[in-house]
Image (tube, helix red, strand yellow):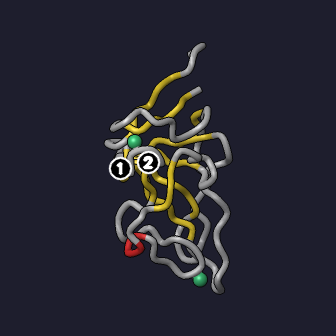
Amino acid sequence: MTLFTCANCWQLLTGNLKKARPSRDTDKKSGHRIAPPRMARGTYAISHDAGFFILHPDDVPGTAPHPDHGRRNGCCGLDGQDGPNLVCAACDADVATKQSDCWTQNLVALDAAAVDRGAESPA
Ligand SMILES: [Zn+2]
Ligand SMILES: [Zn+2]
């Protein structure tokens, strides 16, 4: 099992997660419908090329919405196109980008450079 913490202050950002494959990106449908989450709850995936860990949108209890409203644009949810929109709840560092809009994917992408990945025993 894996836990993610803030690289700046060690605040716990997630619960125990296990590595899994994301579900396939669904085709965008017409209408303002939010896609199903890419990840099941309690799981994460690594996006090596992009430098992100991909999580279910509800699996980041240690984060808070970004205080800058300009980061939190969207139609039905958050489009995540304006930079990180989730901060560490303890130190306000930018840690993740949530996409939950009707025309985007539905996920949270933890910035690999802003978080630490720790394993909980037994590994
Ligand atoms: Zn919409
Ligand atoms: Zn922090």
Element marked by disc 2? strand
Q: Residue furthest bottom?
A: 31
Q: Position of residue 75 (x, y in %)?
A: 54, 82
Measured from the top left, where is residue 108 in percent x and y? 52, 55
| Residue 89 horizontal/vertical position (percent) | 48, 48
**Residue under the image location 46 percent in, 36 percent down:** 11
Circles 2 and 1 in contact, beta carbons < 8 Å:
yes
Q: Which mark is residue 20?
A: none
- Classify residue 25 by image quadrant: bottom right
Mark 2 / mark 1, whichever is N-terminal = 2
Determine the secondary structure under disc 1. loop
Front residue of this view, candidates 17 and 88: 88
x then y, percent, for residue 117: 44, 31
Q: Quadrant of the C terminus?
A: top right
Residue type, label 1: Ala
Q: CA distance from mark 2 to mark 1?
A: 5 Å
Q: Which residue is mark 1?
A: 93
- Residue identifier under label 2: 88
Mark 2 residue type: Cys
**Residue drawn 38% across the image and 60% down it:** 84
| Disc 2 CB within 8 Å of nearest ligand 2 atom | yes
Count all numbered tags in the image, as a single digit: 2
Quarter of the render that holds ligand 2: top left
Residue located 41% across and 32% down the image = 10
Q: In the picture shown, does residue 66 fall above or below 113? A: below
33 up-or-down from 99: above or below: below
Mark 1 C-beta to ligand 2 under 8 Å: yes
Q: From this viewpoint, which residue is outermost toward the front?
A: 90
* Quadrant where the N terminus is found in the figure: top right
